[in-house]
Image: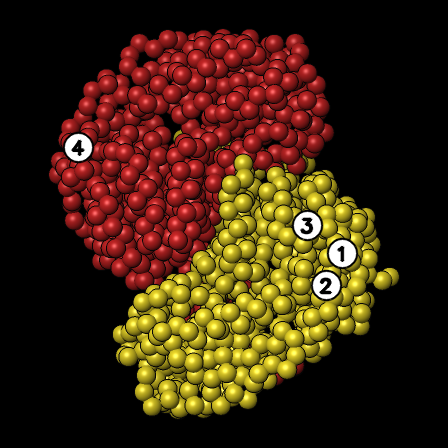
Chain colours: A yellow, B red
Amino acid sequence: MPLTGDMLIGQAGVRGTAGEFHAYDPATGGSLPPAFGGGDRDTVSRACELARLAFDGYRETTHGVRAAFLDTIAARILDCGEELIERAMAETGLSRARLEGERGRTVGQLRLFAATVREGSFVEARIDPAMPDRKPLPRPDLRQRHIAVGPVAVFGASNFPLAFSVAGGDTASALAAGCPVVVKAHNAHLGTSELVGRAVQRAVAECNLPEGVFSLLFGSGADIGSALVADPRIKAVGFTGSRSGGTALMAIAAQRREPIPVYAEMSSINPVYLLPAALHARAAAIGKAFVASVTLGAGQFCTNPGLVLAIDGPDLAQFIAHASAAMSDSPAATMLTKGIHGAFEAGVRKMGLHADVRPIARGKPGTGANQGSAALFAADGAAFLADAALHEEIFGAASLLIRCKDLAELCEVAERLQGQLTATLQMDPADLPLARRLLPILERKVGRILVNGFPTGVEVSHAMVHGGPYPATSDGRSTSVGTLAVRRFLRPVCYQDLPASLLPAALEDANPLGLWRRLDGVLGKH
Amino acid sequence: MPLTGDMLIGQAGVRGTAGEFHAYDPATGGSLPPAFGGGDRDTVSRACELARLAFDGYRETTHGVRAAFLDTIAARILDCGEELIERAMAETGLSRARLEGERGRTVGQLRLFAATVREGSFVEARIDPAMPDRKPLPRPDLRQRHIAVGPVAVFGASNFPLAFSVAGGDTASALAAGCPVVVKAHNAHLGTSELVGRAVQRAVAECNLPEGVFSLLFGSGADIGSALVADPRIKAVGFTGSRSGGTALMAIAAQRREPIPVYAEMSSINPVYLLPAALHARAAAIGKAFVASVTLGAGQFCTNPGLVLAIDGPDLAQFIAHASAAMSDSPAATMLTKGIHGAFEAGVRKMGLHADVRPIARGKPGTGANQGSAALFAADGAAFLADAALHEEIFGAASLLIRCKDLAELCEVAERLQGQLTATLQMDPADLPLARRLLPILERKVGRILVNGFPTGVEVSHAMVHGGPYPATSDGRSTSVGTLAVRRFLRPVCYQDLPASLLPAALEDANPLGLWRRLDGVLGKH
């Protein structure tokens, strides 16, 4: 079935009437068919009402049914085959290899959440049995489980058209938790969104779930997204994108009659610390690997290393020489959209004009539309400490090297950084004492600490944290990647003295689901 | 050592110079010595700086040290002996029995958190071992634990001078998580706060902890509290009190350069549903027990049943007759403060003047200062649905009976209620079908669902949830009572490829702490 440009409201295709717009091929600047119709407040309201109607039934589906649903979404995405990859390539300028890899990641993510739902302990069942003879007062029977918070609004991200978009991590974790999802598609990959949306829509029907479990909205401006977050039926928000976008949603959510949680993953410059012994031993190798990380995917990763810090000296000069050589050799790469490319060029230009910043290297110039050339700058520690503007992210393949005059300044810079998704230590055994000094600072500032790697590359697993203190995210108590992400969409409910016939299966005496539960605080399969 | 009226900033006693004020005895209206000195922005800043300095050291104390600290606080509170009980009686008008019980609850709560820290699985350790040979890409070694968020501001509540105050649930759970605490004392029990604060201060010294782990501030207006929440060193807030107070703190926290979580437990009318078969069989008993719950502690509980709902008819008339008789017999009771008494009287007066509300019963008139007489009102379902003012809490022994014309209206009222801490079903076996219909609605609206009990009485245990959707609390994903409360003050951090010598004990291969951990997602003591 060819692309229609229609929204998916439950099982229906709905033509939006609030303006027409197209997807663009950033490599050519040309528009791609078909025309997409933008939704309006009525469309938002219809999707939210369907989600509300679906909620009570969907959240109480068995773990088996919900897991099968997630697996079915994965299968239907794979069924899209070549059409999905080609459309995503045309809309994003990303390579086939990257998009095939991202599809694998997306499908694997859905399956990991399916496994998490099957395992079932995310409901965190707790039972404190009654003590009818306790003095001075008897204790009632108390049982706790976590339930889904309600319908969730998800905003697709431009830079991961599959893994952080229509059926990406936010959607997968919300569906796993038992929340219906209403997605606002990102305009950078409208056709990709429709294809994936139809895969989810098919899975809903195939699994006999209420149609409101999933809807997909299109809209050219911010109106649809604002209306979605403001809708009283929406109970949480998942977003990956810019700080301005994320903070706008936070403000809307906070001003609602009933404020709701917003999980916005926003901006991060992901500092890389080059510790002295490692720099002395491996300046060349680190320099090359650093540039490979900066330029990966045109630098369009939340975890792109936009800041590198070291103590000034001859070893750092070596690093600079090798990094500069590698960067000068790096080809320009098509960026995701004209807007992102323009913002990257403007950010690089502004950084280059900063009085305290010295340009160090540029990648090869672009040869086609919307191509970004990598850029490396340098400033000293005092300049960085003096100007908050130097702490801002330039989204794309740009990084700023901070030359600290000594260890104390390096630690001061570390202490003054805002919240980040990641921090990386390049270190050798002789750097351990300094690493020990930095570690508590980094723990306070970031969600993930790496040693001798680079932050690009975010494993989807149980122990991953893709999150961090504000402004890296709006809510540093969570992660948007990995199985812990499901917790964002859950809340605890306690049942006191409920008759057995009213108890949810997770809390029945016999533990029919075979869950790990806390019995009087003691964890076991009881 | 007699009361000084001095603040406790770390180990120092600091005389506040921003105004002098006194505690009051609500039973007499008279002021109590000594004079307390109010803090200013400098005092707040000093307490927060000490907390910041203490944080890295305190959060990495061993679980044993932290548990011993919590146990020591409990012991030092008991050491206060009669002086504490007498002062609390004088400041609150609450009875000796109630305050001795509350002291037991407070001490037990500290010990339960000590046990939770010793057990250790609140850090939620997860390990995904490296897969160096995985294709196409190797998997790094990933380890996750939860760490303390940072210094926490705690606001004492007027209605629990021990259990929800200086060393109450918020303080105990924050200290358990590894967060230093800065308490703003409630002006309704200043002397009690100083006594308990000194007990905590002594425990800090005795356990050789950094002094900034605990400070106690006094202040007569809202300035100190506002400055505390705005301080960039504070990373989370615990509050129990009014909706206006809670939402004011939420606004300050949201407007910070780095917004922070606020856990405010605010207002709830705790609906009690009288289902038909139960009402038919037990109208008299339910009526009496209901009045006992409404009037307990002068009605000054967050979980006071301020709303009771039933289908109109002769059985409900029986309930009204028995509840009215019981309430008419109920003695007036001294309320916590002149302000609370005044607000109660104003709320009762306003309710009585409402065109659609009929007064049903009053308790006996007061005979002394600040005594509140219980009040029961009635309105029909349509009136309740039509006027949001009828959904507001009157803090104190007042309740509103809603006479619904039929089952459909009862369910509609249930659906239209705001978020609540609790909902209660009075039901008999024949009510099961209706209970099944109500249950999903209640799960969406409240933190705790009770059957055939009354919501006053909140067990401190593992399965308790004292929380609920807004406006019952600012953050329905949490609880302020029970061991899950510790999670409010934790956030996840992931360590990628860290050398063994840098790993925290909780994540070492050998599991030296004997923790429950997830190894590749599988829970075990490995």
Query: What is the CA distance from the residue labelled 1 to the residue labelled 2?
Result: 8 Å
Q: Is residue B103 above or below residue A251?
A: above
Q: Nearer the viewer, mark 4 or mark 1?
A: 1
Residue at numbered disc 1: A36
Q: Whole-percent x and y of residue A220?
A: 67, 54
Residue at image coords 60%, 10% = B318
Query: What is the CA distance from the residue labelled 1 to the residue labelled 3?
Result: 18 Å
Residue at numbered disc 3: A182
Q: Are marks 4 and 1 on the same chain?
A: no
Q: Name the element at disc 2.
A: strand
Residues at discs 1 and 2 in contact (Cβ within 8 Å): yes
* Callout 2 amino acid: Ala
Q: Can residue A245 be seen in this snapshot?
A: yes
Where residue A245 sits, quadrant-wise, is bottom right
Q: Nearer the viewer, mark 1 or mark 3?
A: 1
Query: What is the CA distance from the residue labelled 3 to the residue labelled 2?
Result: 21 Å
State left or right for residue B38 relative to residue B414.
left
